[in-house]
Image (cartoon, rainbow, N blue to C red):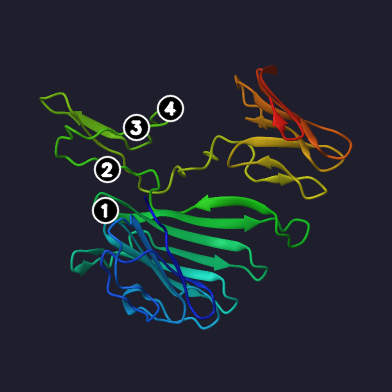
Amino acid sequence: MQVVDYFYNDQRWLKQINTPFPITPVGPTERTVADPEDLFYLDLNYDLANASLSAPAQRNGNISFMRWQVKGGNLQGYGFEYDFLDRLREAHFAEQVGSIQSTDNAFGTSYVYDLRGNITRLKRNGKYGSTVAVIDDLTYSYDTFNGNTNQLKNIRDDAPCPDNLVISSVPQRTETYRAAQAIRFLPGFTFSAIESGELVAKIGCAAPTYTKGYVDRSTNPVSSNRYDANGNLTYDVDKNFGFEYNHLNLPYRATYNADFEANTIFNQIEWLYDASGRKWQKQLKRLFLPFETKDYLGALEY
């Protein structure tokens, strides 16, 4: 049986879940005797600094750094930095492999905000194999046409090449790369086959030409999110969804491929409410014909 133990500091803030495997304690409230049945360990620190995680001490309840470990795995951690309004500004990642601690900030993240508190920049690292690279460098733009608002207009990814996948020239006999539905070869894609018939491929881009996780705006006639007079999102440019609302500002229809491109297969979701706004039905449609319906009656769903 797995027993989960929780430990708190004098302020009754969560300090620790379970015990190290072993890990050298960094605070007097940490338990030092590990339970051999524990599968997970988490350590939260508030008023302690950690130089290896670039984490200054916090005195106001913010978490300065955290560490965790799954039994049999490496010790990992994040150190946090905040701005003068206590908004998260930097998250520094490190991993302990044996006696060596990584310094590549493999999964580090940084944030920038505007004066209203809206996030304007998010930069995120990622790791594939032994390669660490910037996988997201997102810039958030907000609508200023009708004065400064908090309505998100669009997101741009300036990562060096967010869809860049370089497969080693060493024959990949055991590796399998999967795509959700299809693999898209971008400009610059080249390949050559070796004698065994295996494929050695490299996808490269001199400049960002495609943004992973976002629609290709070069083919999308609508370049930004749209809102109605009440502030409801009526078109999501990233997901290519259009939304329609009733007089209660509740969405009653969502249409995929809402920009109505040629030869589009329209997928829709429709909701039915009563006069008080209680939801009674959800219906999925393809080519405007229903293929799945859910009815709601109090706590019942059928």
Q: Is residue 147 above or below residue 267?
A: below
* Residue 20 in the figure: left or right of residue 58: left
List the residue tagged with mark 4: 181
Q: Is residue 239 above or below residue 106?
A: above
- Neighbor class of circle 3 (other Cα within 10 Å; few <14, some 14-19, many 20+) is few
Q: Nearer the viewer, mark 3 or mark 2?
A: 3
Extreme residue in the left direction: 195
List the residue tagged with mark 3: 178
- Neighbor class of circle 4 (other Cα within 10 Å; few <14, some 14-19, many 20+) is few
* Residue 188 in the figure: left or right of residue 208: left
Which amino acid is tagged 4?
Gln
**Which quadrant of the view contains residue 35?**
bottom left
Q: Is residue 71 above or below residue 164?
A: below
> In the rendered structure, which disc, 1 or 3, sits on the residue that comes first in sequence?
1
List the residue tagged with mark 1: 131
Contact flag, marks 2 and 4 (Cβ < 8 Å)? no
Marker disc for residue 220:
none
Whole-number angstrom distance, CA of label 4 to CA of label 3: 9 Å
Whole-number angstrom distance, CA of label 2 to CA of label 4: 20 Å
Contact flag, marks 1 and 2 (Cβ < 8 Å)? yes
- Neighbor class of circle 2 (other Cα within 10 Å; few <14, some 14-19, many 20+) is few
| Residue at image location 24% in from the left, 31% down from the top | 191
SS category of the residue bearing label 2 = loop
> In the rendered structure, which disc, 1 or 2, sits on the residue that comes first in sequence?
1
Q: Quadrant of the C terminus?
A: top right
| Residue at image location 71% in from the left, 31% down from the top | 300
| Residue at image location 61% in from the left, 50% down from the top | 154
